[in-house]
Amino acid sequence: MMTPLRPTLKATVRTRVKPSVIWEVYSSLNWDTFNSNITSVSSSTTKSPPTKLSLGMPLSIVTSKPQFNGTTFLEACFKDQDSNGVITYTLNLNPLATMTQTYKLETVKGGETEVTHGVRYDGMLKRMYEGSVEERELGDEVKEIIRQAEELEKEGKGA
């Protein structure tokens, strides 16, 4: 399956938090702490402390909206030397509909980090699921992950 170029619904927030610290939050796989639609997420390759996220990494994920309980994998997982990058996974909601979630980090002018969370629905039955995640919820996710990263920085644990 090809990863879509752009999410159809997204929220972006700029912050002074370093992208490397935000990556630490993503790498912990505690995505249910910033995404209220995720009930649980884990990986059979994850050890304690968490290992590095990698392309093809299997994920066991449970979501409340849209409802999904199964296994998927990271379709895109790229981080450059400045910790800019993207994480993408797709949930096969039924044989004719998918939801792709994208987390993107980018350093912009002024040294700020732009954090974007996006969603895209595809397939013949995508209309059944469109609207299950709202832009406001995506914005809340981004603000929460930034809050968690700020706490890491204050504790001196961030890179």
Image: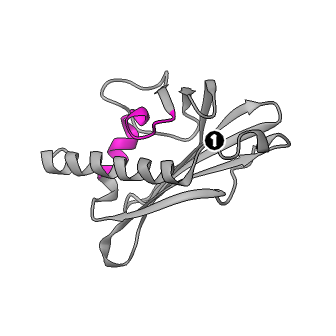
Question: Quadrant location of residue 14?
Answer: bottom left
The x and y percentages for residue 68 are 63, 27
Question: Quadrant location of residue 10?
Answer: bottom right
Residue closest to the far bottom:
109
What residue type is disc 1 on? Ser
Query: Which residue carries the number 1 mark?
Result: 132
Q: Is residue 110 above or below residue 95?
A: below
Query: Which residue is painted at 50% across and 40% down in the image?
Result: 54
The question of residue 25 being in magenta is answered with yes
Q: Nearer the viewer, residue 62 or 4?
A: 62
Query: Which residue is painted at 63% across and 34% down in the image?
Result: 66
Q: Secondary structure at mark 1?
A: loop
The x and y percentages for residue 136 are 50, 53
Q: Nearer the viewer, residue 105 or 137?
A: 137
Whether residue 129 sits left or right of residue 12 in the image: it is right
Segment tinted magenta in the rendering: 21-37
Query: Which residue is painted at 45% across and 54% down in the image?
Result: 139
Residue closest to the far right:
124
The x and y percentages for residue 35 are 45, 39
Query: Which residue is painted at 77% across and 38% down in the image?
Result: 97
